[in-house]
Amino acid sequence: MLFVESGVEVSIWVPPLVAFVVSFFTSMGGVSGAFLLLPFQVSILGFVSPAVSPTNMVYNVIAIPAGIYRFLQEGRMAWPLTWLVVIGTLPGVGIGAILRIRYLLDPRAFKFFVGLVLLYIGVRLAIDLAGKTGRSKGRSAEEDFLQRLRATRREEGKRGRRDAGADLQVRTKVFSLSRLSYEFCGQIFDCPTWGVLTLSFLVGIIGGAYGIGGGAIIAPFLVAIFKLPVYTVAGAALAGTFVTSVFGVAFYQVIAPYFNAAGLSVAPDWLLGALFGLGGLGGIYCGARIQKYIPARFIKGVLALIVLTVAVRYVIQFWWH
């Protein structure tokens, strides 16, 4: 099938299948999978124009609500953290879109940029895995969550719906201009409000240029630097990515007419993005449903391996191809 907007020619079942597999695994770590779908579009499908970035965001817009729904059902959505990510990221998305069009038109340069972003994500995850020989506060809460979840499921038996239980939900304690604090599994976690906002703004710039919304970058940072448990970061990162992706798609679509005269494709390929999104919808829902049964360390390890593999390949191609 030929997708007219992007010029991509591929079987109609390939985009949703690839998106399902990718999003199933990445959603367990609180990211939608868009950061891996973009390299697939660039390297495998040959989609290298600036339009690939908003097309990737269309995937986010369609796919992410399924994961958010699961986290809402289980009470694991840290809403104050989500709004900090959204407020900080939105201004950066527009700046990133302009930078993509003006300075990253060359496919080789764009791949190098993508490689550097992925390299950062992968290294952060790897450091988080290798550097924690003891039980950090976040890891302790993650392990406690799994233990309590198993106990809750045993107690509920055959009584019908199996929820995480009230004691396994996120409860906000403090949300001010200086600090955010919430309780999870009997422990209190906090982070600086302005620190999250500043990080989110920088992430928005990168995410706007890349086409990922920012969750893939901010989730590892929240886990590794602020020591927040991955089981609470996942929902917030997905929700933040969804909102910023909606804004990003709209922004690219609005500015597209100004670049059409120069023959530059900026608007998203809605059909291709929708097919990726439909596959991601199922993958994210299943991943969010399974996440609480998979050890957090395993989730981070798989993500780190995949991300570093793609990153190293892109960086090497830039220098030696």
Image (cartoon, helix red, strand yellow):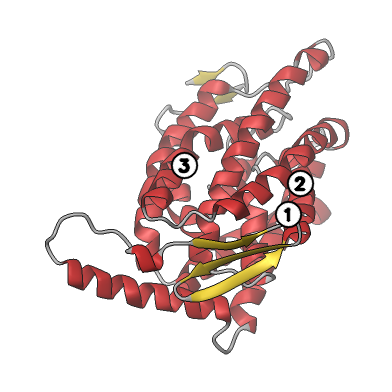
x and y, in percent, of residue 187 in the image: 51, 76
The residue drawn where x is 63% and y is 75% is: 128
Q: Which residue is mark 2?
A: 206
Lower position in the chain sequence, tag 2 or tag 3: 3
Lower position in the chain sequence, tag 1 or tag 2: 1
Q: Amino acid at mark 3?
A: Ala
Q: Are marks 2 and 3 in contact (CB under 8 Å)?
A: no
Give the distance between the C-alpha atoms of the residues marked 1 and 2, in whole angstroms.
Answer: 8 Å
Give the distance between the C-alpha atoms of the residues marked 2 and 3, in whole angstroms.
Answer: 22 Å
The residue drawn where x is 54% and y is 48% is: 238
Q: Which residue is mark 1?
A: 117
The residue drawn where x is 70% and y is 57% is: 176
The residue drawn where x is 49% and y is 62% is: 171
Q: Which residue is mark 3?
A: 19
Disc 2: CA contacts within 10 A as few (<14), some (14-19) or many (>=20): many
Q: Amino acid at mark 2?
A: Ile
Please give the count of numbered marks on the rendered protein. 3
Relative to 245, is 252 above or below?
Answer: above
